[in-house]
C-alpha cells in the first residue's frame, strides 16, 4: 500500500489558560480552558504523512531535521490511530495498512518552543494528517491530539474553542468543542509581539507538574475561579462584549503567572519587556476609559494582544513606537471551521 496526505493546522491562543494535569499520561487537565484559533494563513504547522509497505520503520522529521520517533507522546498518538484503524479494517488493503510504516514530515512557519504554541499546532496537524491516511476521521480527533499535547486539542477547531476538562478517568469526556464560529465576532484581531524567539526555560509540561504539586493558589484557581470564568467569557463572546472579554482575559493571564510565582521553586515566564507591554495596555485602556485591548501571556515572554480592528491600529503603532525591537504580526482570528483544511 501507498497512501499520503498533507494538511496544516494553526496555532491557538488561550484566554482561559490550561495549567495543570490530573493525569499526565492521558493528558487530562485540572481545569477547562478556552482559546481562539488563528487563521490558516497565519502561524501554522504543515505536516505530510506518507504510509507505505516499503518503509521498514516509522520516521519523523521536524523543521527539516530527523528526530527520534520514540517520543512517548508521539507513540501514544500513533498507537491510538492504529488501534482505531485496526477496529475499522475490513478489506485486504485496509489490513495491509496496519503493517505499513509512516514517514512524517512537519514544518512550522514560526520559531519552535518560543512559547508560540508550536506543540499545539504540531500535534493537531499530525493527528489530523495521520487520521486522513489511516481513514479514521469519524473519531473525535481532539481526544487524540490531546494525548500529544493538551493545548493541541483546541487547534482541531477554528474560531472560539473550549476544552472541557471532563471528569472520567479514561479521558473520554475530555475533548475540544467549538463554542463560536470565527465570523461570530467580526473585526476581532490578535497581535503577537515576539519579545524573544529563544527556546523557553521551563517547559509547560514540567512547569505545570511542579505547580500542581506545590501551588495552593492553583488549587483555588481550579475549584473557585476557572468554572466561573469559563461561563463568563462564553457569555462575553456571545454578547460580543469586548470590555468583559478583555478584563477576564487579562485577569486570567495574570492569575496564571501568579500561580507560576506561587510554584515552588518559582517559575518566571514574563520578562521586563512583557511587563512593560502590560503597563502600556493598561494605560491605553485607562486613557480610553474602557477596556479596549487585552494582553495575555503563555509559558514565555511573548505578548499577545486581543483588540477590535480600530483599537488594534492604535495599539500596533504604540508598540512599534515603544517596543521597536519586537517583531509584530497582526492576524485576523481564524476563519476556519473544524477540521483543519487539507
Ligand atoms: C500556558 O499544551 O504545551 O500555553 O499538555 O504538557 O503539552 P502539555 O502542555 P501545553 O500547555 C500549554 C499551557 C499554556 C496555556 C494554554 O495554552 O492553555
Image: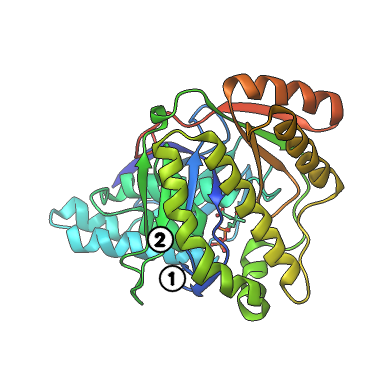
Q: Is residue 70 visible?
A: no
Above or below, comparing residue 234 to residue 293 in the picture: below
Local secondary structure at mark 2: helix
Which quadrant of the frame does ligand 1 lie within?
bottom right
**Which of 273/91 is in front?**
273
Residue density around tag 2, few if under 14, some if 14–19, many if 20 or more, within 10 Å: some
- Residue found at x 76% / y 30%: 327
Residue 82 image position (x, y, % from top left): 32, 61
| C-alpha span from label 2 to label 1 | 14 Å
Would you name the residue on which mark 2 appears? 78
Asked whether the beta carbons under mark 2 and mark 1 sit within 8 Å of each other, the answer is no
Give residue 190's quadrant in the image. Answer: top right
Residue at the limit of the structure toward the bottom, as seen here: 213
Would you name the residue on which mark 1 appears? 26
**Which of 317/6 is in front?**
317
Is the residue indicated by label 1 positioned so its CB lies within 8 Å of ligand 1?
no
Give residue 302's quadrant in the image. Answer: top right
Residue 4 image position (x, y, % from top left): 36, 40
Above or below, comparing residue 320 to residue 84 in the picture: above
Is the residue indicated by label 2 positioned so its CB lies within 8 Å of ligand 1?
no
Residue density around tag 1, few if under 14, some if 14–19, many if 20 or more, within 10 Å: many
- Residue found at x 45% / y 62%: 227
Q: Name the image quarter holding the C terminus.
A: top left
Which numbered disc, 2 or 1, marks the residue that appears first in the sequence?
1
Please identify, in this view, whether the residue under mark 2 or under mark 1 is nearer the observer.
1
Q: Is residue 185 visible?
A: yes
Local secondary structure at mark 1: loop
Q: From the viewer's perspective, tell me whether residue 10 is left or right of residue 193.
A: left
Amino acid at each position: 500500500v501507498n497512501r499520503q496526505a498533507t494538511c496544516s493546522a494553526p496555532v491557538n491562543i488561550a484566554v482561559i489558560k490550561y495549567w495543570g494535569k490530573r493525569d499526565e499520561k492521558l493528558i487530562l487537565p485540572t481545569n477547562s480552558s478556552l482559546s481562539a484559533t488563528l487563521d490558516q494563513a497565519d502561524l501554522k504547522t504543515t505536516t505530510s504523512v506518507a504510509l507505505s509497505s516499503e518503509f521498514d520503520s516509522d520516521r519523523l522529521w521536524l523543521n527539516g531535521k530527523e528526530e527520534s520517533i520514540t517520543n512517548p507522546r508521539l507513540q501514544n498518538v500513533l498507537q491510538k490511530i492504529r488501534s482505531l484503524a485496526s477496529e475499522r479494517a475490513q478489506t485486504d488493503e485496509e489490513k495491509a495498512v496496519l503493517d505499513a510504516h509512516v514517514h512524517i514530515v512537519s514544518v512550522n512557519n514560526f520559531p519552535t518552543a518560543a512559547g508560540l504554541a508550536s506543540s499545539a499546532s504540531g500535534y493537531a496537524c499530525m493527528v489530523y494528517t495521520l487520521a486522513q491516511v489511516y481513514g479514521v476521521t469519524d473519531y473525535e480527533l481532539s481526544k487524540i491530539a490531546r494525548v500529544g499535547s493538551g493545548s493541541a486539542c483546541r487547534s482541531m477547531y477554528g474560531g472560539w474553542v473550549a476544552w472541557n476538562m471532563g471528569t472520567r478517568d479514561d479521558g473520554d469526556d475530555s475533548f475540544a468543542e467549538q463554542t463560536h464560529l470565527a465570523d461570530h465576532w467580526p473585526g476581532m484581531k490578535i497581535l503577537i509581539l515576539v519579545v524573544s524567539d529563544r527556546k523557553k526555560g521551563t517547559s509547560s509540561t514540567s512547569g505545570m507538574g511542579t505547580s500542581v504539586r506545590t501551588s495552593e493558589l492553583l488549587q483555588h484557581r481550579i475549584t473557585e475561579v476557572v468554572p466561573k470564568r469559563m461561563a463568563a467569557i462564553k457569555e462575553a463572546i456571545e454578547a460580543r462584549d469586548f470590555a468583559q472579554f478583555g478584563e477576564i482575559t487579562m485577569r486570567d493571564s495574570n492569575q496564571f503567572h501568579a500561580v507560576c510565582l506561587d510554584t515552588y521553586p518559582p517559575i518566571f515566564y514574563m520578562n521586563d519587556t512583557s511587563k512593560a507591554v502590560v503597563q502600556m495596555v493598561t494605560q491605553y485602556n485607562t486613557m480610553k476609559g474602557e477596556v479596549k485591548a487585552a494582553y495575555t501571556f503563555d509559558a514565555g515572554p511573548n505578548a499577545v494582544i486581543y483588540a477590535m480592528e480600530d483599537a488594534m491600529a492604535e495599539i500596533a503603532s504604540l508598540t512599534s513606537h515603544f517596543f521597536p525591537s519586537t517583531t509584530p504580526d497582526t492576524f485576523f482570528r481564524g476563519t476556519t471551521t473544524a477540521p483543519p483544511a487539507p
